Image (tube, helix red, strand yellow):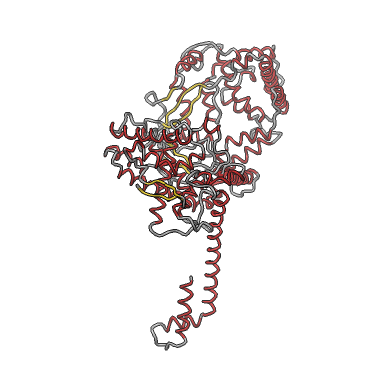
Amino acid sequence: MDNATSTTNICDEEASTRRRTSPGSKFVALVSRNKRHLALALAAILVVAVVAASVLVTVQNTQAQRLRRSMNESVDPCEDFYEFACQRWDADQGGPIWQSTADTIKREFGASRDNLLQGRYAEPNKAESYLINFVEHCQNDKPRSTSEGMDPVLVELKSMGGYPLFEPEWTWGTYCWMQAEARLAHMGYNQALLQARFDVDPKRHGRRILVLGLQPLMFTRAVLDKEDTVTGIRTFLRNVALSYRKLHNGTKQYANEQQDVESQITEMFNFSRALLEIKWLKYLRKLTSPALQEASLPEFNDTDSVMVLNLEALRALAKFLGNCRQNTHHVRAMANYIGYKFLINSVFFSPQPEIRETYYNYTMQQGVQFNRTAKCRELVETLRLVSYHHYFRTNQHKFDQQRALAVHMLDEVKVQFNEILKAAAWIDSSTRTLLIRKDKAPKTNGPFLERLVYHRVQKYNQQVKELFLDRNPEIWQDINAETVNAAYHIRDVNVKVYAGMLLEPFSYLDVPIYVNYGTLGFVAGHEIIHAFDDRGITIDEFGVDFEKDQWSNATRQEFNRRMQSLIDFYAKTFQVNGSHTRNENLADTSAARFSFKSYRHEQGPTKARVLPGFEKYTNDQLYFLSFASIWCNNNKYDPNSIYSNNHASTAPVAKGGRKANKAYANKDGKYNTEGCREHVSVDKKGFTVTSR
């Protein structure tokens, strides 16, 4: 900007002395005629520059202040690098540095969800409209009937084949337990008898496999042995059944109605004797046919694969259940048992006050006071992907630049890792080819929103289709939109960086590149390395298990020896179970190296500006300070994480990235691993990166 201003001044001075016929006269004349406009334009440019500079300074100051608040420069980094980087955070703060980011995005997500559910968002899409309608209906103390004036509880029970407890004229001849179980699945409920889910097929690229197992019993031995509990369930079912029968019967009278209800409840509790085998193909077709027909896909057949869990238990259940429409006294008990799964989770949606009151009394007897608002909140949580989709859909602009930055750094880390693979003399050529193919496979730039499957029924139908169609990337139910994390999926060969990682202090715009490579670049690079740990290397670039070890014996032995050196280093240096945490430690130490090399490569020979107040530190040192700062945690030796987690505690992570390469470079003094050519050494003047 200074140069531009200077050039303009020179032009103005020359305009007063040069003749009109000079080569620049036309430009000078234009400037002379438009001095006022030019002055205004220059002023505007100057204002923009000042604002941009102030924003830049503010961002850099924010990062500098965060580092300063954590550091204790009186600690010798040679003795304890973690204390040097984090001691003041440990002393002053109430939790890990990640917590503030997690709290921020949780607040934002909560506000977004509340705005959606309270109707403050003008243009909800179909799934969001469904959720809004569901919440309004759920929270209504006087639930609505269907548009036809029907009780929604009875409507759904009828779709399952009816419910004998409520219908004195119910007949077993048209009932099919398979259809009832499939209907539960299609409504998004857990089934009553069998557990059918769709997992990633480890043997077929881009496909799912149907996994079949048993559901936990609704009435376990522990439940049936408690007389008070059984009495409570009996009373609840009897009262609800008699209320519904009264509505169903109208003026018609049935003899011994209460006795019939009691008898059926007893049958349901005694549902335990064996009959014929299940026609499994018929059952699996009922589970999958609606979604497959919608997609014009062929029906499930006896050549398609199924993964079976608890095979002997399933065989016993098969003998017990029998086929559809078999003339057996078990059919009615079966119908009541399966229907109970739906009833106990949905009866409070009934528009009948006396039926809702019966349910409320039952929960009170079980020691739980029914809270409709809390129950609805619980049900909304099962549909949380709708809210997540809305949050990202309405805030996508907020993450666009950070996401592009994350993708760029992931690509750079992969480039550096690829260079190491090519140069590693201990890896034979065929193994190197496999690893390079795998390195090129992780996808980091897929659609940002399309990965959110936002309705559990839609998800079920989609996963059925993926038995035969290409599978979408996985959605992990245990990681939600508020998570501050990144993750690697072994079957997708895919790195996922979650929204929290795109916010400060993990991602900054307008800071020197060593800051982001030390934070987000390290964390995302860590996940890439999981493609090459001792689990990842058993899976190819398509996410399919190798049928046998593809590595040569020499390469495998050398890999194992190097892994053992890492195990020994962590066990001796940090007193953690080095074997249990080996893959995480490998990812930590490797990511520290590759993200460092990536920053060095991108920055080139020109030094970046230093953060305000850190003029005595080099760019390399500030990379490691940024890296260490995200692990500041006042509970760094948390015993719970030691016993329950396969990650090392936070202090070993911060220290390990600095020490590990040096440690196993010197293993037995005989060899230098690829992770050891660059390591961090420390002298009394500070810590520096040197090459071996």
- For this rendering, which residue is in front, 334 or 35? 35
Q: Is residue 652 above or below residue 338?
A: below
- For this rendering, which residue is in front, 124 or 117? 117
| Residue farthest to the left, as pictured | 429
| Residue farthest to the front, as pictured | 684
- For this rendering, which residue is in front, 682 or 191? 682
Task: State whether residue 313 appears in this view.
Answer: yes
Task: State whether residue 390 appears in this view.
Answer: no
Residue 256 lies, in percent from the top left, at 69, 11
Residue 557 lies, in percent from the top left, at 31, 32
Q: Quadrant of residue 352?
A: top right
Q: Is residue 195 above or below residue 143?
A: above
Left or right? Give the position of 589 relative to 72.
left
Residue shown at 50%/35% (left/top)? 459
Number of callouts? 0
Residue shown at 32%/30% (left/top)? 549
Residue 206 lies, in percent from the top left, at 39, 36
